[in-house]
Image (cartoon, rainbow, N blue to C red):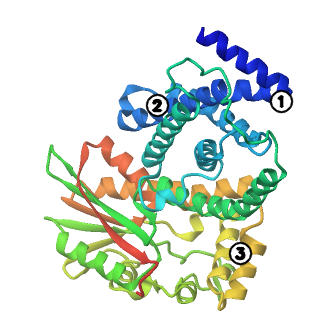
Amino acid sequence: MPLASGISTGIALYRRSGNLAMVDFMFWRVLLTAFGALYFADGLLSVLDEVFPSAHLNGPRNQVAWIALWASLAVYLLLPWFGRLPYWILLPPTLYLLWISFVGVFPLDLCLEGGFWAAWMQLVLGTLCLIQVYWFSGWQAPSPVWLVPNPNAAAPPFRWVRLLGFAALNIALLPIALACAIAGSITAFVNLGTEGYARISWDGVYLQERHFVREADGKEIRLIGMMHIADGQFFDATWQSIRSGAGRNPIVLLEGVTDRRAPVSRAQGKKSGYSNIARLLGLSDQSASPLGLAVTSAMDGDTVVDGIPLRRADVDISDFSPLTLDWVDKMRDFMQTQSWPELTRFLIEDFLTEEKSEVIEAVWYDIHDHRNGVLIAAMNDALTTHDCIMIPWGALHMPAFQEEIAKSGFFLTSSHRRPAIRFWTSP
């Protein structure tokens, strides 16, 4: 019988090669096939969850992903010790899954929607893994030999060259993985934290403008993602978009923290502009652009520029807590750096040190949550007297604004993404 013949072959190999042959007996087909099927199932569930988010597959997806991750880690660590485990089948899928699990989807998310295409990539690798297992394990043979190691495998069970090569590969990948983990964290914070209003891509940083309409009365809101430092053309294009796209009875609600009521001892001799940092980075400061001049003109109260009403909808620095004021002082000093060595020293000594949790919470509330509340109140007030509200604010604030206007019946009608910083072209 084929099964008896297969078992006899396995016993013969065990007697000839010792315990390692028994390990092969289990790994070459049972474990290899099970790993390929598990990896494929994880990729398939991930793709289905991304394509059909309403199917509620997130729970099963996470459970299978957790098992697949530990299986990949185990197989990856076993690869250098068992020479008969095929590198060309197991290394690509295990290394990929460990990378996206511990490092993230960077640099894939620079070109594509990271989570969606990462799932598809895993499905492709899982499919290729199963196909290779099929041919490598002897499933295509006429007899059922899937439980028996390949009797033609001549590779020794253990080789020092294989172990040393595996160690060299991991040593070479470690600094790359650390660099990608840091870059991936920054990319994820920007892309996910702003819900797409800001996006880091392979060729630059893009900011998005979204147009919302309320069907009941036809009123419009335009949320325009911004940043303080960018290419000069970005600020010009944004201001031109505000001028040309203003609907009927418009108003622009501007971002801009004043410093009129702060103690003189805090503000004396300290400027809060971004010009020095912009110069070091080869970029432009918003304050020198037409949009920046419009913001400055609205600091003293409502005004009109190029026929468009402007209103500052922000706080004064004295509204901040003492912890936030200390952080603002530190930021002002940071903004005055004149050279790269000075900038590096500042980053290491002041910004890469661990901040106390109460400082982080106070700063986040004052800089983000409190200011969001002020703008939302101004937006709701403006909706009673105006029909088109334009809000050019920092991209990190936009998700809260979008959530608020959705409660008032506004729905997205269009969006536009414009480049803020180009990596490969001069501004």
Q: Amino acid at mark 2?
A: Leu
Report the quarter where the C terminus lies. bottom left
Q: Relative to 156, does residue 256 appear above or below in the rendering?
A: below
Q: Earlier in the sequence, mark 3 or mark 1?
A: 1
Q: Amino acid at mark 3?
A: Leu
CB under 8 Å between discs 2 and 3:
no
Label 2 vs label 3, nearer the camera: 2
* Element carrying mark 2: helix
Q: Earlier in the sequence, mark 1 or mark 2?
A: 1
Say which mark, if any, is on residue 204.
Answer: none
Q: Amino acid at mark 1?
A: Ser
Quote the CA–CA distance across marks 3 and 1.
59 Å
Label 3 vs label 1, nearer the camera: 1
Pointer 2: what residue? Answer: 45
Q: Residue 177 lies in what quarter of the image?
A: bottom right
Q: Position of residue 353 (x, y in %)?
A: 77, 65
User: Is 273 in front, or is 137?
Assistant: 137
Q: Residue 21 lies in what quarter of the image?
A: top right
Classify 10 Å Cα crowding around label 1: few (below 14), some (14-19), many (20 and above).
few
Q: Relative to 401, does residue 59 appear above or below in the rendering?
A: above
Residue at screen point 66% across, 38% down:
72
* Element carrying mark 3: helix
Pointer 3: what residue? Answer: 347
Pointer 1: what residue? Answer: 17
User: Is 343 in front, or is 165?
Assistant: 165
Q: Earlier in the sequence, mark 2 or mark 3?
A: 2
